[in-house]
Image (tube, grey):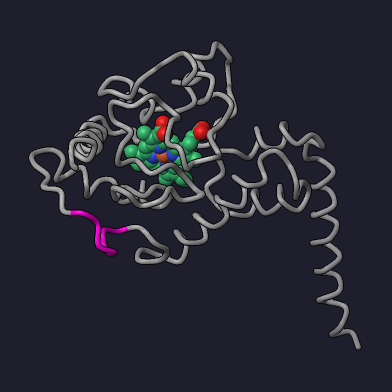
Amino acid sequence: MAGFSIPTIAGAVILALFIRTAAAAPDDDAALWAEIQNATDPAPYENYLARFPNGANAPMARARVDALMTRQAGPGGGEGGEAGGAPACPLEGDAVAGEREAKECRLCHAFEIGRPSRSTGPNLSRVFGARIASVDDFTLYSAAMLEVSRQGLVWDGDTLDSYLKSPGEFLAKRTGTPEPLHNMFYRLTDVTRRGQVIAYIQSLARCR
Ligand code: HEC
């Protein structure tokens, strides 16, 4: 008999912790999102979805759960990669290294010309030289990205460099909002790798 009480106690403790966590979390959609938006494991997004299944950020939360589950499943999981008959596009110089360095970006982005955007991020094959947040088939841009897009900003070497270094700071500076909500919770901190990935994105935009 006593054997049954152990799982029951454990269950009660977990339930109590869950209730406490739920109670301590902000009860406002935007506030909770602000708190969790940089999480790198799926649990906080699942928690968000449990509380706000129809919340403003629910589509993005679902996309992140998918992307992060794929990542946890290890390389090779999910789509991405060059398989699937992408048009041939010769890469030169830094762009060659950049294609390799963009491996993590593929968790969320497609780079193949003509392939649809994924729900987790816009297709990046045509962004260089284009207005920011203007990939037609991507519908989950943050308000901050759209605001900067309305300012007419275009992706070039400099704008991409500062965005990839820190999307949050980039958007803060350009919107004048200290911590704008945004949807890319990924930074490329290494300046060399940033240069290579940018060379890759630039080369793709030149490919027909
Ligand atoms: C976890 C998913 C995720 C990862 C990883 C990620 N991104 Fe993103 N990225 C996004 C999302 C979502 C957006 C849209 C952001 C917004 O609207 O706030 C975005 C936007 C962008 C944009 C702007 C595109 C446009 O249409 O204006 C660029 C450029 C970009 N990402 C490049 C990269 C690169 C390069 C990497 C890898 C070094 C990367 N991203 C990694 C999710 C991701």
The percent coordinates of residue 69 (x first, y second) are 52, 61
Q: Is residue 190 left or right of residue 116?
A: left
- Residue 31 visible in the snapshot: yes
In this view, the residue in front, 174 or 35, is 174
- Residue that sits furthest to the top in the current view: 176
Q: Residue at x 82, y 68 (%)?
A: 11
The percent coordinates of residue 169 (x first, y second) are 46, 21
The rendered magenta stretch, by its main secondary structure, is classed as loop
Quadrant (top left/top right/bottom left/bottom right) for the N terminus: bottom right
Tell whether position 173 is magenta.
no
Q: Magenta stretch?
A: 81-87
Q: Quadrant of residue 206?
A: top left
Q: Is residue 121 left or right of residue 161?
A: right
Q: Quadrant of residue 133?
A: top left
The percent coordinates of residue 60 (x first, y second) are 59, 45
- Residue that sits furthest to the bottom in the current view: 1
- Residue that sits furthest to the left in the current view: 93
